[in-house]
Image (spheres, helix red, strand yellow):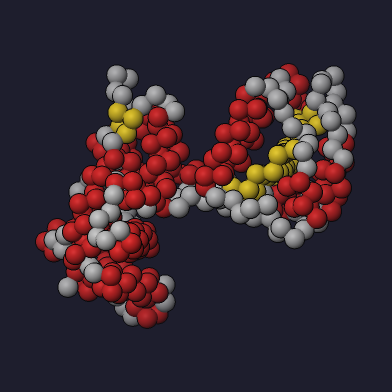
């Protein structure tokens, strides 16, 4: 089985959800991988649709990997439902199960009146195991291995998520949300849903103002704006933002700022690669493929001049160095704010 990608994960997820909403259920669902969001939604949909609320008392069993074992799960799955067409057995945190042999034997010959969901939170299964081979090769159930989104894919995912809910979002707002949430879809969905819940009913488009008002992200003081100031080598703006960060260290964690700047300059490095391969001209579609929107493509054009390829690589090395310093005794008595100011001075000089 090919390695899962974010695109293949999304396609498989949509196929599974479509079947569930049509009332078609498989005998088992093995949900694994780095991104737990998809497993959460699949489990939620099945639990809501597979059996009626009246049947759940006798025919729905929720287990956790830290207080059960594979043999008990298999035995529960082999039982017959009580006064119902089917039963549902859900195992969460299945990565804590020690021995999967009984489950491997079960999915080779599953009980037709049972829907078994086994969710390995944040874990990829060892492809050499018999359990993996049985799960991924069976036609009686679904095996989903979810890949974590790349940072440059998050904004596009936000656009699609908002579109499916009948709205649009502007580029800047999507970038702010992506920067704030990172690649963790659970967190991203919580924050996005908060905005959807609180925007005015007649609104059809989410703006940067909506993000600022509902999420608490300042449009003036955030990593997105710091990266912009560094791109244009705007020292006054950069140090104004850094000073604000230094005075509010709890609100702006050093490690999160470093992650944002590392992502920005890594994207600039990819932009250099695109420019080299296309004789200096980077198309909108090529820029989008690495997470650069039209509204900030000019920024990357300027940044590529301010930070040529070797200098860009040097900046990434500086960020890595300060990340190491922030996590070790190498920092001495310097505060996070002082480290940040020193690092930005070295980057922008």
Estimate the x, y position of residue 163 in percent, counting from the top left: 40, 29
Is 139 or 218 nearer to us in this picture? 139
Left or right of residue 8, residue 247 in this image: left
Residue 296, compared with residue 273, is above or below; it is above
Direction from residue 111 to residue 240 in the image, left or right: left
Q: Is residue 245 at least partly visible in the picture?
A: no
Displayed quadrant of residue 117: top right
**Residue 55, can we see it?**
yes
Residue farthest left in this picture: 236
Residue at screen point 82% across, 20% down: 84
Residue at point 69%, 55% (across, down):
125
Residue 50 x/y as whole percent = 71, 25
In this rendering, would 41 be left or right of 211? right
> Residue 140 sits in which quadrant?
top right
Q: Across the whole image, how many numbered discs are drawn on residues?
A: 0
Quadrant of image for the C terminus: bottom left
Query: In percent of the image, x 26 and y 73: which residue is there?
Result: 311
Residue at 57 percent across and 34 percent down: it is 14
Camera-nearest residue between 215 and 139: 139
Q: Position of residue 92 (x, y in %)?
A: 68, 44
Q: Position of residue 48 (x, y in %)?
A: 64, 26
């Amino acid at each position: 089985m090919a390695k899962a990608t974010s695109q293949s994960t999304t396609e498989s997820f949509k196929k599974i959800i479509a079947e569930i909403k049509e009332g078609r259920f498989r005998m088992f669902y093995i949900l694994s991988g780095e991104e737990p969001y998809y497993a959460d939604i699949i489990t939620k949909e099945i639990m809501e649709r597979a059996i009626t609320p009246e049947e759940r008392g006798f025919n729905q069993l929720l287990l956790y990997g830290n207080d059960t074992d594979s043999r008990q799960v298999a035995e529960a799955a082999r039982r017959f439902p009580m006064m119902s067409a089917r039963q549902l057995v859900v195992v969460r945190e299945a990565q804590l199960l020690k021995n999967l042999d009984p489950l491997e034997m079960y999915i080779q010959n599953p009980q037709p009146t049972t829907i078994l969901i086994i969710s390995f939170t944040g874990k990829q299964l060892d492809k050499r195991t018999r359990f993996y081979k049985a799960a991924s090769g069976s036609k009686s159930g679904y095996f989903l291995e979810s890949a974590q989104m790349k940072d440059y894919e998050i904004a596009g995912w936000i656009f699609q998520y908002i579109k499916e809910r009948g709205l649009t979002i502007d580029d800047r707002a999507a970038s702010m949300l992506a920067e704030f949430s990172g690649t963790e879809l659970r967190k991203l969905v919580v924050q996005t849903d908060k905005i959807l819940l609180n925007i005015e009913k007649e609104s059809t488009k989410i703006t940067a103002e909506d993000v600022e008002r509902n999420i608490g992200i300042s449009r003036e003081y955030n990593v997105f704006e710091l990266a912009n100031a560094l791109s244009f080598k705007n020292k006054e703006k950069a140090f104004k933002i850094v000073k604000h960060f230094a005075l509010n260290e709890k609100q702006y964690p050093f490690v999160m700022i470093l992650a944002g700047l590392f992502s920005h300059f890594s994207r600039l490095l990819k932009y250099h690669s695109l420019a080299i391969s296309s004789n200096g001209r980077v198309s909108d579609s090529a820029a989008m493929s690495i997470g650069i929107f039209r509204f900030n493509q000019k920024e990357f054009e300027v940044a590529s001049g301010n930070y040529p390829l070797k200098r860009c690589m040097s900046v990434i090395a500086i960020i890595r160095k300060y990340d190491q310093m922030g996590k070790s005794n190498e920092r001495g008595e310097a505060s996070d704010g002082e480290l940040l100011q020193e690092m930005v001075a070295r980057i922008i000089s």
